[in-house]
Amino acid sequence: MRSLVVIPVFNEVSTVERVLRRVRAFAGDVAVIDDASTDGTSEVLAHLSPGLGIRVVVRERNAGYGRAMQDAFALGARGGYDWVITMDCDEQHEPDWIPRFLCEARAGRFDVISGSRYLNVEDAEGSPPEDRRSINLRITTEINDRLGLSLTDGFCGFKAYRVAAVQGLELNEDGYAFPMQFWVEAVVAGLRIGEIPVRLIYTSANRSFGGGLDDPEVRYGHYRRVLHCALKRRADRLPEAAVDGLMCSPCS
């Protein structure tokens, strides 16, 4: 079983070296997608990558988290990998957990193995801002209700994907709302979805979502709109309950 760890990076100069050195201890093949960083991250990557044997994809313009996920799947397919593992570079995802994802992947039960920060919070470090936890809970609940899933964390970016299983998904959401579209596509495609616990770590609450999304209600509305647009697009392949009472705002 061949696996590739893909790490989207945007302005992570303070953490990128520590994270990559730890990841290399648990992963043979690693790729970084530098989403047009401007804080010195690109220079650190250029210095580190040859010695660590890490592939770096550098974008000239910022394209967004969702685009990085789409690129991760493409990298996995082009490289002939069986699985792609995605994780963040802000030290809130622990590289030590990579073997657990690989172990679950080898078991062959799932096509998508999603980390959940809320399955076991006994060893949590810090806590998410209230607005983030509330939005996660509300959106995850709606995803479960509409799609018949039982997720506990609809937003965690620490995941393993069976490459062959995600190749047929129609994904074009480039921003942070990418998971909203992904879950709809995964259910429509009949993918087997499972969760494993990962440690809840919040060392900083300073992330900016951009585009006005730092306002929690604007962000919540945006996430719901993307979810509902994804549901509308697949309405002919979903139960009536999944598309009942969708928002009427036009999709973009």
Image (spheres, grey):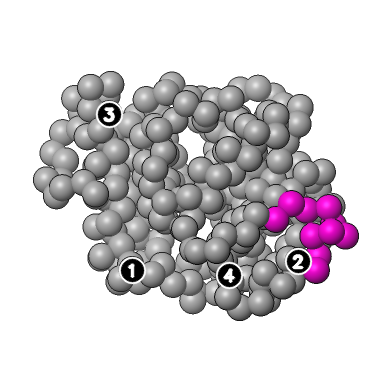
| Residue 99 locus on image (x, y percent) | 76, 41
Q: Which residues are magenta?
A: 47-56
Q: CA distance from mark 1 to mark 3?
A: 27 Å
Identify the residue at horizontal 29%, vertical 47% (top origin). 226
| Residue at mark 1 to residue at mark 2: CA–CA distance | 29 Å
Task: Give neighbour class at mark 2: few <14, some 14-19, many 20+ (Cα, 10 Å).
Answer: some
Q: Main secondary structure of the magenta part?
A: helix
Q: CA distance from mark 3 to mark 4?
A: 35 Å
Residue that mark 3 sits on:
234
Residue linked to disc 1: 211
Q: With 26 as the anchor, is 121 left or right in this view?
A: left
Query: Which comes sooner in the sequence, label 1 or label 2?
Result: 2
The secondary structure type at the circle numbered 2 is helix
The residue furthest front is: 60
User: Is residue 158 shown left or right of residue 152?
Assistant: right
Q: From the viewer's perspective, is the residue at label 1 or at label 4 nearer? A: 4
Residue that mark 4 sits on: 37
Three-letter residue code for mark 4: Ser
Q: Amino acid at mark 2?
A: Ala
In-image side of 224 versus 149 (left or right): left
Vertical relation: 93 (above or below) 230: below
What label sits on residue 46 in the rendered view? 2
**Mark 4 Cα shell of 10 Å, populated few (<14), some (14-19), many (≥20):** many
18 relative to 90 in the view: left or right: right
Q: Nearer the viewer, residue 218 or 172?
A: 172
Mark 1–mark 4 Cα distance, whole angstroms, equals 17 Å
Measured in 3D between alpha carbons, the distance from the residue under mark 2 to the one under mark 4, in whole angstroms, is 12 Å
